[in-house]
Image (tube, helix red, strand yellow):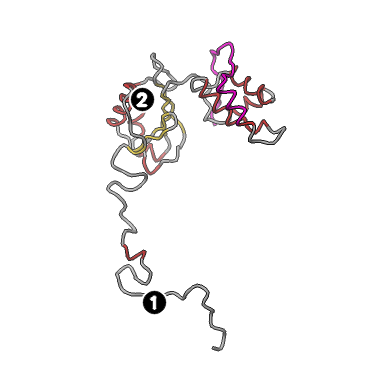
Amino acid sequence: MSVRRLAAEQPESFVFTPELEQIAVQLIAKYPEGRQASAVVPLLWETQKAAGGWLPEPAIRAVADRLGMPHIRVLEVCTFYTMFNLEPVGKYFVQLCGTTPCMLRGAEDIKAVCRKKIGEERHVTADGTFSWLEVECLGACTNAPMVQINDDYYEDLTPANFEKLLDDLAAGRPVKTGPQNSRHGAEPEGGARVLTDPALYTRGSSVDGTSTAEAPATGDAAPTPGE
């Protein structure tokens, strides 16, 4: 696991907004009295959103104080889970899967587009719109190569459709999440190709359409030995 450290440049302070405080109250109420520390992960997640997509050190301390936890314990959580960003990210944070299935399907070409359109890893564009990072497997191997942008997956990428996706996001145009080709979910392109014969789902028929013996009805007694 790579070492995760806080960003060198930090804001002086962080204060819970009324909206974030209301969320904190709702999250803490889900746990028994004295167990408010159990809300640390969801509260950090909501705090990250409120802080602009990352967790400054003052925000980490604010969460710890709100939950009555030592600061170091909350810092340990933040540095363990990669869902928490410890440095500023762009409005659209691109996480590019570089694990084996995506690599074999063209992740290096997608990485080249990131460098061309955004810059090097961890760099935030001058207008604050984009940043990117190569990450471990995101679990969409069938639809490789793919990226996660904020909370959404974009799959079956090519350099051309990925460039267009970034351009559309930058321009505020609507984009399609999920597969960027004609695929539906993780099905093959063009639709399902197996288990499509209706006979497979008709009781008493075999795959070739011939009749098969009916199965005994539920509850029929099995013959006793010697009958």
Magenta residues span 1-26
Circles 2 and 1 in contact, beta carbons < 8 Å: no
Residue 29 part of the magenta segment: no
The relative height of residue 22 versus residue 184 in the rendered view (above or below) is above
Q: Which residue is mark 1?
A: 213
Residue 97: image quadrant is: top left
The residue closer to the viewer here, 119 or 92, is: 92
Q: Is residue 16 above or below residue 28?
A: above
Choose mark 2 or mark 1, whichever is in front. 1
Q: Position of residue 141 (x, y in %)?
A: 40, 42
* Secondary structure that dominates the magenta span: loop
Sequence-first disc among 2 and 1: 2
Tell me the amino acid under the disc marked 2.
Cys
Spot occupied by residue 41 in the image (x, y as percentages of width and height): 59, 31
Residue 190 screen position, x and y as percent: 27, 48
* Residue under label 2: 114
Q: Nearer the viewer, residue 53 or 218?
A: 218
* Label 2 SS: helix
The N terminus lies in which quarter of the figure?
A: top right
Instruction: Name the residue located 39 percent from the left edge and 33 percent from the top edge.
Output: 147
State the residue at coordinates (32%, 63%). Answer: 198
Query: Mark number for residue 54?
Result: none
